[in-house]
Image: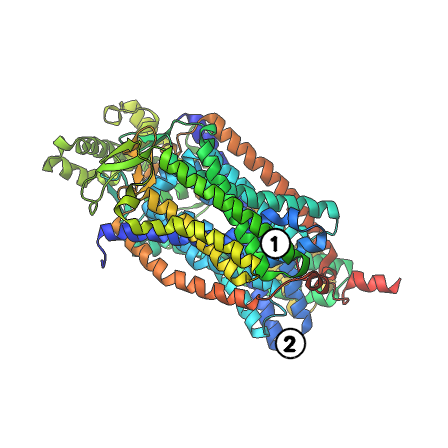
Amino acid sequence: MIFDYETLKIIWWLFLGVLLLGFALSDGFDMGIGTLLPFIAKNDKERRVLINVIGPTWEGNQVWLILAAGAVFAAWPLVYATAFSSLFFAMLLLLFALFFRPVGFDYRSKLKNQTWRNAWDWALFCGSAIPAFLFGVVFGNLFLGIPFHFNDELRLFYTGSFWQLLHPFALLSGFVSLAMLIMHGATYLQLRTEDIILQRSRKVTCWIAVIYIVLFVFAGVWSIFLLPSYHLTFIPDVNQTLNPLMKLVEITEQGWLYNYKQHSWMLLAPIGGTVGGAFVILFTLGKHPKFAFMFSSTAIIGVILTAGFTLFPFLLPSSTHPSHSLTIWDASSSQMTLMLMFWAVVFFLPLIILYTRWVYKVLRGTLTVKTIEDNQQTMY
Amino acid sequence: MTEEVVDLSRLQFALTAMYHFLFVPLTLGLSFLLAIMESVYVMTNKVIYKDMVKFWGKLFGINFVLGVTTGMTLEFQFGTNWAYYSHYVGDIFGVPLAIEGMMAFFLESTFIGLFFFGWDRLSKVQHLTVTWLVALGSNLSALWILIANAWMQNPVGTEFNYITMRMELASFADVFFNPVAQVKFVHTVAAGYVTGAVFMLGISALYLLKGRDMAFAQRSFAVASGFGLAAILSVIVLGDESGYTTGEVQKMKLAAIESEWETQEPPAAFTLFGIPNPENMTTDYAVKVPWVLGLIATRSVDEEVHGIKDLVAENEKKIRLGIIAYGAFQQIKQQENQTPEVLETFEQHKDYLGYGLLLKKYTQNVVGATDMQIKQAALDTVPNVSVLFWAFRLMVGSGFLMLFLFIMAFYYCAKRQALQKRWLLHLAVFAIPLPWIAAESGWIVAEMGRQPWSIAGILPTHLSVSSLTVGDVYFSLAGFIFFYTFLLVIEMFLMFKYARLGPSSLNTGRYHFEQQGSKT
């Protein structure tokens, strides 16, 4: 094996970041546009413009999410088990909302009936806005810790309730995520549409970017001054095989700043998250959609890295039994599995990016109401 | 965990998996058929083949999206409802799932968009490549999922780690080349091809019966009959019964399918018909065909096919060994008791740890289990014989009916008489549900036959569930039933609508309803 166990654990933490970014950067604008669908497109043809901007590619984009979940299953089985069964209702809600997307895109155009189509527009709205919001809620809960513990055979017990997940900070995180993805969707629309829809997208981008920046900064301040944080005080050699019951974790009242104090370069992440949003406004007003999209992507990268850097090495802190928290050191798969999956990622990820790029290249260009009129039969 | 949570979780998984498999086989079969028809189009340049790809592609799309929708449920469900399972075997089971995402699902999902929207933006050969990639993606997807499933039936290449309290990967090659995985893959994808072929054959027959879009329907009928014949022969000849001799739990499954209570002198007779009687452990009114079972199951005349009673007796021994393994494991967990002797005892018996865990259904104190409890746990290793016996016969019966259909269809197509054989066309229409009946019964055999295990010989089903309340599972079950019913109604509505409309739905002006419209 070319890497020791410790290095592999860190590599997999980075891979998870890459997969989450792949999801947020690509499916993120699909969800943003789905959320905007009933609001910035006023009639059927305009809505079809929005749907066809993302229609041919959203499906591939969503696989990033499926893959991120699959990677957690393979690389941190306990995290997968704990996250999905503890956040049972949130996950089901997420799943039910996601149901609406494949059918919404494909079935909407199969009938001309306007009631049918309006119903699917709202279905697509739910299938986009609810997941976008829930992702933030889930991340917010990671900062708060989740009430779970294990018995000595590592059977998991969750002692909270669904309502406990809706802590004000988690809701705030939900809105950060929603605003961020709407901003991303609106900047993507600037790239792919013209005329009236383009103008509306610009307007939406500016407003939502302001909201996003305010919420993100507010969440940052909250997590520093008002939230307790988790701190790893003892762990055996992280290069060995460990289970989550062998370490000690303390809850401190110092806020989530520990890693930034140790490594000040990490501050680039929250700075990128904030400044990225500001540049989105700047380049939207300056009518440079490419740059606006680039900086919206920068903002997303900043936000996800902020979450990762802040929590490191925690993946899922336990609020009732802090020492049972799951970290990248003691919740990972075996060295052999991590190594094997490392090769799988190294081989397939570049391939995926390559053919996805080609597909986007084939489908490039802007869409207008006229494109829809000319291709009545073949488009969604 | 209460018994009720386990039962409800099982019911939910069974329902959602079977529901998912309403859409999967058609995706597997039609994607391949689309690629074949488009290849013909590119080679011959006949527009009618392009229309065929587009029309059957429309039906493919309606079906495909529900396959995607319901596939997510299965992934989520391992975490939400089967948390202990996910923890206990995620180190191995997660691997094929994640590779499936990277190698197959990404490919399929990225190119499906271009399949529908790329006609005007791609050259003919480029578009054909895209179609083949979609077909390749869906088939590779099946490969990895079946590798994962086969590992549940015959868990190879794995070892228990008492520190992490789970099974860990020992050899990926063993997992990949699992013999059960290989037969399962061929059997399942070929069953998918049959489904696609029956679907296309049946709907084309409908147009032929109604006397419309004849050229279009005849060609579709011909493609489907040839492809279907090849596929059904693969399903039957490579039927996965041959896989049942590898793996201990698979042997029990085979015995249950045949309602084979006693071990027979080889070569064993095949019970064609009978009424399994689990109470008395006999099969009433059995009609037997000598030799056949031995031949099918062992491909030999001198190997034994084990009977249920013998297998139960063997399992009782394994449970007793499992108790020793569990006892040693408990001592190891208390660090001060990690003597070399204890570790040695554990090493020697750890393969039976799973059998020890079977007792947890009756007592938390595995080491102190009574003789009664051990005997009861051994009896639990017999799956539901009646269900397996009948589901298997339903599957095989449907299979042979379809074989007959495809032989006839292919024969009369070759003689160019299919059009005159109205009984054949009617048969083709009524046969449309058969592949689904066969596939769903096949999964019932495969998965109910694995009980009481979720991972054969390693992890009992009753230990695999999440620590949820009955109310939680009722909620999720109700949610699935509600959304799935709703989605099925819409899907069927669109499917019937477009199947009835036929190629006229392409708006090319070349087909029945459009021409009729222009005449009046």
Q: Position of residue B163 (x, y in %)?
A: 22, 39
> On what subunit does the disc labeled 1 rest?
A
Say left or right for B495 vs B351: right
The amino acid type, in three-letter code, at marker 2 is Asn
Say which amino acid is labelled 1.
Ser
Residue behind mark 2 = B45
Residue that badge 1 annotates: A201
- Residue A147 in view: yes
Q: Nearer the viewer, residue B16 or A212?
A: A212
| The C terminus of chain B - image quarter | bottom right
Where residue B30 appears, as percent x and y from the top left, is: 58, 59
Crowding near the residue tagged with mark 1, few <14, some 14–19, many ≥20 C-alpha atoms within 10 Å: many
**Relative horizontal placement of residue A7, taking residue B53 as reference (left or right):** left
Q: Residue at x 45, y 45 (%)?
A: B75
In the picture, residue A331 is in which quadrant? Answer: top left
Callouts 2 and 1 in the same chain: no
Element type at marker 2?
loop
Please state the chain letter of the residue tagged with numbered disc 2 in the rendered image: B
B410, above or below B9, in the image: below
